[in-house]
Amino acid sequence: MSQPSTECSFAAESDGYISWLRSSRDLSSHTLRAYESDISALCEFARDSGDNTSPQMTIERFFDEQRRDGYSPSTLRRRAASVRGFCKYLSDNEFVPANPWPNNLHFRPRRGLPRAVASPDLNRLMSYLMRASGVTRGCGWDATFKDMNHATTLVGTALMLSTGLRVAELTRISRPNFDGASGAVKVVGKGRRERVVFVTDEWQRRLISAYIESTVSPGVELDCLLLNSRGSRLSEDQMRSRLAKASREAGLTNKVTPHMLRHSAATQLIEAGVNIRFVQRLLGHASLATTEIYTHVSDAALYDAIENAGVIRRTLTPDN
């Protein structure tokens, strides 16, 4: 039997791989689109190259071209992870005689510091969402909202900022999994791992409870916590879009993303002295090494605080 062409090995099985990811892996729609884009780029390269070289050689040439085209290191690492997973899928299902991932391909991991949102920008964003929703911070506000779309964005933003939830976890929260009395929220994270996070601020608990009460319709049972304008579950992309729009309308220079809110929550906890193990549990990190990156952010904050204080500078600089 002749060896199947590279194009067949890749393109013929790419749809099956994406379908397998969608059904068996707990990936966000954003991540699935990235996988699909990366595998599609490989299949297109294999088709355009028009030769019958081995799949391994095709992958090597693909990444050589990606480097020449000037793709960033982070994009190359992401595409390498996508293609490596695809190669394992092809091998495990015996679509190819052996795993075609080239062992000589290495992409050095390089993790930059997370981008957190500056406190003044967070305050401005939350103040804008509160005004647009018709909500005040003072005691005694009732369970009515001026604008439910803004109220949904406000509740989602407050939850991510106080608990460090991923946007996929946020949009999956069901109403029965929120306890208004204790502030406990049961969430389902990566790998379908369940954990409990806590909304410790009483005002935020009242905000969420009031939002739930305001979206209850007679004879209609709703399970999801956050609703879109059509009354169905708010999607991850809709939350991203709403947050970006709120950033612009609040007058912020930089667009705020859900991931930045997660970084902000983790950074604030570390800088407040919370044990890193507790932060790991809150964020749902499988490895402590993932959480430890936030200690670098704390070090940066420490440097800035010392620099701004100027104690050493004033001590060493003689008076004129």
Image: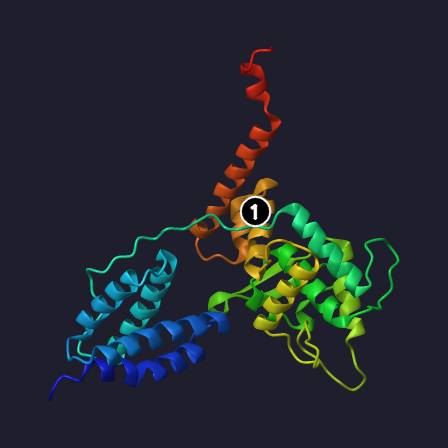
Amino acid under disc 1: Thr
Q: Residue at x 63, y 70 (%)?
A: 173
Q: Position of residue 254 (x, y in %)?
A: 59, 55
- Pick the quarter of the image with the C terminus: top right
Q: Position of residue 6 (x, y in %)?
A: 21, 80
Q: Quadrant of residue 35?
A: bottom left
As displayed, is residue 156 above or below residue 117?
below
Asked whether the viewer can see residue 95, the reply is no
Q: Position of residue 262 (x, y in %)?
A: 57, 56
As displayed, is residue 274 above or below residue 212?
above
Q: How many marks on residues?
A: 1
Asked whether the viewer can see residue 167, the reply is yes
Judging by the rendered image, the residue that carries numbered circle 1 is 267
The colour mode here is rainbow
Q: Residue at x 51, y 52 (%)?
A: 280
In this picture, residue 181 sits left or right of residue 274 = right
- Pick the quarter of the image with the N terminus: bottom left
Q: Residue at x 79, y 70 (%)?
A: 147
Q: Nearer the viewer, residue 102 or 20?
A: 102
Q: Residue at x 69, y 66 (%)?
A: 153
Q: Nearer the viewer, residue 168 or 4?
A: 4
Q: Quadrant of residue 15?
A: bottom left
- Tag 1: Cα neighbours inside 10 Å, few (<14), some, or many (≥20)? many
Q: Position of residue 275 (x, y in %)?
A: 55, 43
Q: Secondary structure at mark 1?
A: helix
Q: Nearer the viewer, residue 284 or 71?
A: 71
In this picture, residue 239 sits left or right of residue 193 = right
Q: Quadrant of residue 259?
A: bottom right
